[in-house]
Amino acid sequence: MLPYFGLYDFLLLIIYLFVIYLGAILYVQKKIKNDSIYRFFIKALTLKIAGGLIYAFYHVYVYGGGDTFVFFNAAKDLAHYVSFFEPQSLLVYFSDFDPVHYNFSPRFNYILNGHDVLFMVKITSLVYYLGSGSYYAMTLVFSVFSFLGLWVFFKTFSRLYPMVQKELFLAIFALPTMLLWSSGVLKDTVTIGTLGVVVYGVANLFIFGKTRLSSIVFIIVGLIFIYGLKPYLVYLLIPSVLIWIQANIKAKIKSRFIRNLITPLLIVSIVISLSYILVLLSSSAGKYSLNNWQSTLRGFHSWHSYLSEKSHQSGYSLGEMEYTVTGVLKKFPAAVNVTFFRPYLWEVRNIPTLLGGVEGVVFLLISLYLLVKLRLRFFLFIIKNKDLTFLVSFAFSFGFIVGLSSYNFGALSRYKIPAELFYLTALAILYNYIKNKKTSSV
């Protein structure tokens, strides 16, 4: 069932937009006196809202389907089920799906047995109340949440690199596919927003030295949300964050002797803690468990190849693959290339892939420009700068995973947005070196 746009939706949209912008304007007026970064606030908010509404109207009136409507309709069923206010009905929020006891949406039983889908439906059912039952008002709520997460991500790196705030703004808020795929009623919207919140919390604690309880809460709740929706993202985020943290701890130690002495201890502690955390998380990750990576990867390839053949979608292949660690690692260059620079323009078959194709050209041109300007310093800056090491390590590891597993340009355009966010942010910071030759961060 598609949620077409009626008078009720129109009136709610006007009311919600008025309340959102009134609150935003008052907030900016209070903050901008002490921080000029807030001159970007309304622009960024408007871009996110526009992206969400464009996504909603496109999928209702042009595409006529998509995961977003599965989440919306199943969430509506769950909200109605819980609305009876029986103690038993509320337990569904704290339990895995059981069709015998919690058969709240029979038409979607075939997909609700997935932990990630059920988790998203639970989130969406809560937003269903905030959006007064309107899909379009709910889209605004999701868009604002994603915006807030990206805003604190933007604030973090703008504080570290104030000379490239405009470039950071464009990298974080102005990428078309990221606007579309991280602003609607989607898992990607929630994960990109919580990803920004986690980075903000980590930066507050370990870079800016703000030992606030709120930062700890941001990190814990953010990781819970990301793990509930996309466990593999947590597998890659935690190592990158730990590298970032240990680099900042080392940087605060003035004595070179002590830094050299403590480095092996930090590395060993990171490896041990990382191994424990990943094993613990993997044990409850279902199909995303590290033990199931081969079967899951085969499943992704087979399903997306089927869609490409039967539904005339834009598929791609990385060639023959051995489903071993060595065989998969051999595909690293091709997988990273497909994530950041494909589809090539001659591979474009529809409007969504056209956006991805144009963005791939832009990514390639910016990367080549910085390589030509900086030459070997391009790589030296990434290695020496702790922030760049963090951003690029996550961007390329995540880009490798999604490029390796998607096998469909339509799916890839959604999955890759965290990698694009981190990579473009890194490129904006690298541009800082061209503008200023040298910064205090190196």
Image: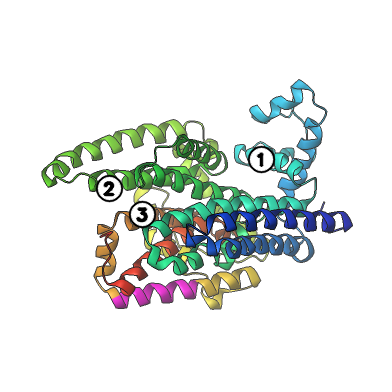
Query: What residue span does the magenta drawing correspond to?
Result: 360-373
Q: Amino acid at mark 2?
A: Ala
Near mark 2 (Cα within 10 A), the count class, few <14, some 14-19 or many ≥20, is many
Is 128 part of what is drawn in magenta?
A: no
Whether residue 294 appears in this view of the structure is no
Near mark 3 (Cα within 10 A), the count class, few <14, some 14-19 or many ≥20, is many
Q: Which residue is mark 2?
A: 247
Residue 233 drawn above or below residue 22: above
Q: Determine whether the residue tagged by mark 3 lies in a helix, strand or loop.
A: helix
Whether residue 190 appears in this view of the structure is yes
Q: Which residue is mark 3?
A: 393
Q: How is the image coloured?
A: rainbow
Residue 399 drawn above or below residue 285: below
Q: Determine whether the residue tagged by mark 2 lies in a helix, strand or loop.
A: helix
Which corner quadrant of the image does residue 263 belong to?
top left
Instruction: Please identify, in this view, whether the residue under mark 2 or under mark 3 is nearer the observer.
Output: 2
Instruction: Please identify, in this view, whether the residue under mark 1 or under mark 3 is nearer the observer.
Output: 1
Q: Amino acid at mark 3?
A: Ser
- Closer to the chain start, of discs 2 and 3, is 2
